[in-house]
Amino acid sequence: MGPALYRPGASPVHRLPPQVKIVCAGVAVLCVVATPRDAFWGFGVHAAALGVVWRAAGIGPGWFARRALIELPFVVLAAVMPFTGGGRRVDVLGLSVSVEGSLAGWNILAKGTLGVLVSLTLAATTHSGDLVRGFHRLRAPKLVTTIASLMLRYAEVIAAEAHRMRVARLCRGHDPRFLWQAGATARGVGMLFLRSYERGERVHRAMLARGWTGTMPEPAREPAGAKAWAAGLSPAVTAAVALGVGLCLR
């Protein structure tokens, strides 16, 4: 959920306090996971609520679709399950398909896709630094927020170092497209680890010299108002209502 996924904007979704969006995303994912797999209309309600959030945020579905390809292995698994599952089987277009396997595959596909899209929505509308501050305002353990803050601060530094090392290898004739260059790539990864470790040691000594006490300075608390909580949790409430109706109709 770093800057690569964040889409700057001034929409109502972007302006919501980060702790509100974190709670909303967590509740929404829990509702999606708890939705019965045969409540097809319930998944439609979840998707519709997510589409409303995208429209309010001013981000098109194409942006999310391209980044949701990370779940492709689960899609392949879901596509195979109707043909490998047991139980009662039916013929669909001349193919023998397992009913239980089809439901299991649909369950994986629907819940996995919605979970990924909810996470991408949170990342696209909330800067990584704001996410850390949001968890801090939700009283997450200080050790967790401290590690996350330092990781976010130096992830770009390490990425820039890796880019410089790659450019240096290319200038010396390294071509990563060939298999026999795998050794040079592996040595580069090892050198990057050593440089990152040494940099971390230097940074830690510098922090101790400046009075580091083991915790990051606490940001000023900005409590979210009732209106912000009501607006931010409305998609989660919609998902919870759909879950409740789906459970009652079983």
Image (cartoon, rainbow, N blue to C red):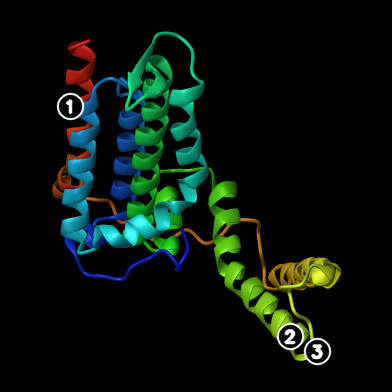
How busy is the neighbourhood of tag 1: few (under 14 within 10 Å), some, or many (20 plus)? some
Q: Is residue 25 left or right of residue 80?
A: left
Q: Nearer the viewer, residue 23 or 42?
A: 42
37 w.r.t. 78: above or below: above
Residue assigned mark 3: 172
Q: Quadrant of the rendered structure where residue 114 is? A: top left
Residue 41 image-quadrant placement: top left
Q: Nearer the viewer, mark 1 or mark 2?
A: 2
Label 3–label 2 contact, CB within 8 A: yes
Mark 1 sits on what residue?
Answer: 241
Hey, which residue is sitting farthest bottom in the picture?
Answer: 171
Residue receiving disc 2: 170
Identified at 25% across, 62% down, the residue is: 14
Tell me the amino acid under the disc marked 1. Val
* Gap in angstroms between the C-alphas marked 3 and 2: 5 Å
User: Could you say where residue 134 lies in the image, as x and y percent from the top left?
Assistant: 39, 52
Quadrant where the C terminus is found in the figure: top left
> 185 or 24, which lies in front?
185
Q: Is residue 209 above or below residue 43?
A: below
Instruction: Give the structural element (helix, strand or loop) at label 1.
Output: helix
